[in-house]
Image: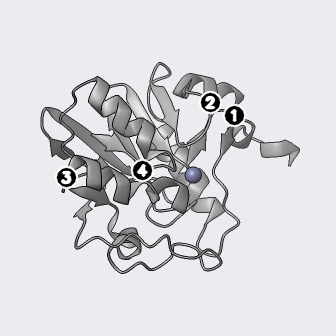
Amino acid sequence: MIIDANLEPESMVDLVRARRANVRAILLTHTDVDHIAGLPALLQELGPVPVAVHDTEKSVLTDGKPLRRHFAADGARLAGAASLSEGRPYRAGSLEFEVLHTPGHSPGGVTLKIGSLVFTGDALFAGSIGRSDFDNSDGEALLDGIRSKLMTLPDDHLVYSGHGPPTTIGMERRHNPFLQPNPRGR
Ligand SMILES: [Zn+2]
């Protein structure tokens, strides 16, 4: 499975070819342009594999409705998309991802978890959290989701976020300034 369709689909296609991977699905953590712009190129190369996204952001893919009011739509139009919903694992091939709804950066933000690997999209980064200053963001929901669904995972779980280096749940629990009892000195 491929998680997110970033602005450099060619490097993903190269990786898929080098590994002779049989891609069964593309899972989207959310639908900001830098996470979906590569979709047309990926689908062209890989064939019509299912694309899965949280229901609240499905219209971005199927109707070309931009996620953010001030950014133009990216133009990708899919005939349909599969649903990622919390509590319903997403299975394809031999893989099964647990879906955690971690909104706040965007309404349909999800974290995908497989074993001890956690793909947080733009909810949690190494040393930071996602932006929540957009019209359809919600800073409180973002922190709530991170605290209740991610910080409750074991310390050794590896976090691969949408941007920047990997980290661990334990590292973020201890050092992420946004998750401390008094964030940013307030
Ligand atoms: Zn992003």
Q: Residue 172 got which mark? A: 2
Q: Earlier in the sequence, mark 2 or mark 1?
A: 1
Q: Are marks 2 and 4 in contact (CB under 8 Å)?
A: no
Q: Earlier in the sequence, mark 2 or mark 3?
A: 3
Q: State the residue at coordinates (48%, 67%).
A: 107
Residue 40 seen in the current view:
yes
Q: Earlier in the sequence, mark 2 or mark 4?
A: 4
The residue to which callout 1 is attached is: 127
Left or right? Give the position of 177 relative to 48. Answer: right
* Rendering quarter of residue 61: bottom left
Q: Are marks 4 and 1 in contact (CB under 8 Å)?
A: no
- The amino acid pointed to by label 3 is Gly
Q: State the residue at coordinates (60%, 67%).
A: 137
Q: Residue 5 got which mark? A: 4
Q: Earlier in the sequence, mark 3 or mark 1?
A: 3
Q: Are marks 2 and 1 in contact (CB under 8 Å)?
A: yes
Q: Position of residue 67 (x, y in %)?
A: 51, 72
Q: Residues within 10 Å of mark 3 (few under 14, many from 20)?
A: few
Question: Which marked residue is nearer to the observer: mark 2 or mark 1?
Answer: 1
Q: Position of residue 152 (x, y in %)?
A: 47, 35
Quick one: 33 or 162, which is closer to the camera? 33
Quick one: 75 or 177, which is closer to the camera? 75
The residue to which callout 3 is attached is: 47
Q: Position of residue 32 (x, y in %)?
A: 52, 62
- The amino acid pointed to by label 1 is Gly
Disc 4 is placed on an element classified as loop
Q: Position of residue 103 (x, y in %)?
A: 49, 59
Q: Earlier in the sequence, mark 4 or mark 3?
A: 4
Marks 3/1: CA–CA distance? 37 Å
